[in-house]
Amino acid sequence: MPRGKLYEQETREKFADIARYIYIDSTPVNDFKFREKSQKHAQELIGFIEESLGNADGCIVGYFPNELVILNF
């Protein structure tokens, strides 16, 4: 990710991997591979979102398990 920006193709592939793991019933061999890739991509995207929102002026961002909280002031 150059300078914190995601390229469109790379982002689409990450979301496709996540969707593939969630929605496609695969063999146990592929399930492990898809799960690992999906977890990695999700953590990268969450980190990017948190960083972007944290840099926004006039708001506080907090992340709790399964919940993203944004307080604007």
Image: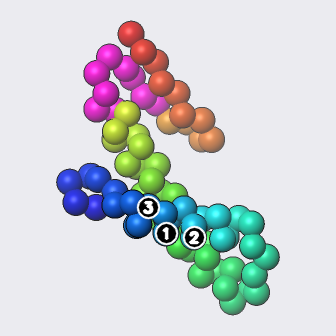
Q: Earlier in the sequence, mark 2 or mark 3?
A: 3
Q: Dot 2, how many residues are within 10 Å of its Cα: few (below 14), some (14-19), or many (20+)?
A: many
Q: Quadrant of residue 68?
A: top right
Q: Quadrant of residue 18?
A: bottom right
Name above or below for residue 13 compared with residue 28.
above
Residue 64 % position (x, y): 55, 36
| Residue depicted at 61% across the width and 76% down the height | 34
| Residue depicted at 60% across the width and 41% down the height | 65
The boundaries of the magenta stretch are 54-62
Distance Cα–Cα, label 3 vs label 1: 5 Å
In the image, is residue 60 part of the stretch drawn in magenta? yes
| Residue depicted at 34% across the width and 32% down the height | 54
Q: Secondary structure at mark 3?
A: helix
In the image, is residue 1 part of the stretch drawn in magenta? no
Residue at the disc numbered 3: 11
Instruction: Identify residue type, mark 1.
Output: Glu
Residue at the disc numbered 1: 13
- Residue found at the very far left of the displayed protein: 3
Q: Quadrant of the C terminus?
A: top left
Distance Cα–Cα, label 2 vs label 3: 10 Å
Residue at the disc numbered 2: 17
Q: Secondary structure at mark 1?
A: helix
